[in-house]
Amino acid sequence: MMSYFAVNGGTQLSGSVRVNGAKNSVLPILAATILNAGENIIHNCTELRDVQSAVRILSHLGCGIKRQGKTLIVDSSTVSRCDVPEALMREMRSSVIFLGPILARCGQVRLSTPGGCELGPRPIDLHLSALKKLGAEVTLDGGEIICRAGSMRGRDIVLSFPSVGATENIMLAATACAGQTRIINAAREPEIEDLQQFLRTAGACISGGGKSEIVIEGGRSFGRVEHTVMPDRIEAATYLCAAAACRGHIELNSVCPQHIATVISILSDAGCDIKTAQNRVTIRSADRISALPPVQTMPYPGFPTDAQSQLMAAACLAEGTTVFCENIFENRFRQSGELVRMGARIKISGKTAIVDGVRELTGASVRCTDLRGGAALVIAALAAKGESRIYDIEHIDRGYEKIEQAYMSLGGNILRKEE
């Protein structure tokens, strides 16, 4: 049996929806539970395919896992392995985040190269070179990564690019290093701050999260930790783009407006009426939106690459032409061909996409190419005239918990079906 979404588009979205815990935050936090050799209580932990994959990795390593609603309880006192098999690693690209904490806890680690969405080269060279600088012995053998702690000591690590994954892996590995580690040109994403807060609560000495320089004092003892995961800024951005495409009026709750400031700014420039409060964002898009200002994806606090596909879906229905420049992943425009099947007018040239807005999209059978591209297809289908079928929705389930229920609560006509 294969699941797909059946969508009858053309209805305006209205109502309120609660934003779940951040996928890109909970995954490194789950990896970090390995460090404290004790109980980890993680609240606001959404049920996603990627979270399930991370839990399977933790179980393989010997951790005890319990789920109570949106809370995961991880007992890492029973870690008994330092390897992750290929089948588990291939389930998600971010599985490489287990490299640093396993090395720090066990003194050695063996992983296969990770899987996940095919968005072009996402080399883990930055991760491995940083671990080498900390003193780890790193060997690549037939698709496997083998690391031994050796005599790891803190030192300055200068990243050539502010990679989120590399920053997180260094933070986690450095907790086991004697002395001080400084990450220079660190990623500044809010998820980095969330990981820092988790580690601080557990007993680590870390400062600078959210800034370009992070300092870790190694050799600290860890203990029981309880933490609430931050809201998912990409999920919030997705619903804003859906409201813009469907001429909707929706309210997002449990959201941090400053985390999506660039998305709010662009949609406001396109004619959406957006108001923010402490934990709430409302958007009203009564008319067809105007063409968007040029969209260039950049590391945080720039426009997030993870929201580019969804914004493109809205731009397909804008009045005028929008230019997208993708500066992070070379294959982030893979959804464009499926959008064209629905009547969109998109031209791709290298890392640039030119979208000429049309008055109406038409329902079609389309396939998800990746997580965020799949979310874009759902937005387009909700806005389109007629019925759409969206296949390969397991990509969407990696990053959105029962997205069809959220849209149904907003008045969208979308059902999960089997065939």
Image (cartoon, rainbow, N blue to C red):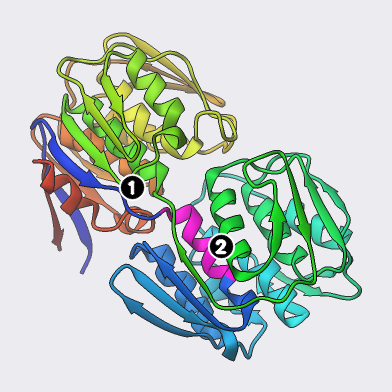
Name the one closer to the observer, 217 or 274: 217
Query: Where is mark 1, residue-wise?
Result: 368
State whether residue 398 is above or below residue 70.
above
Looking at the image, residue 164 sits to the left or right of residue 238; the answer is: right
Mark 2 closeness class: few <14, some 14–19, many ≥20 residues within 10 Å: many
Q: Which residue is located at x 55 percent, y 28 percent?
A: 302
Give the tally of numbered discs: 2
Q: Main secondary structure of the magenta part?
A: helix
Amino acid at circle 1? Cys
Name the one closer to the observer, 303 or 260: 260
Is label 1 in a helix, a strand or a loop? loop
Q: Which residue is located at x 18 percent, y 34 percent?
A: 250
Q: Quadrant of residue 228?
A: bottom left
* Residue 401, x across and y down, in percent: 29, 58
Looking at the image, residue 296 sits to the left or right of residue 206; the answer is: left
Looking at the image, residue 360 sits to the left or right of residue 320; the answer is: left
Query: Where is mark 2, residue-wise?
Result: 198
State whether residue 407 is above or below residue 104.
above
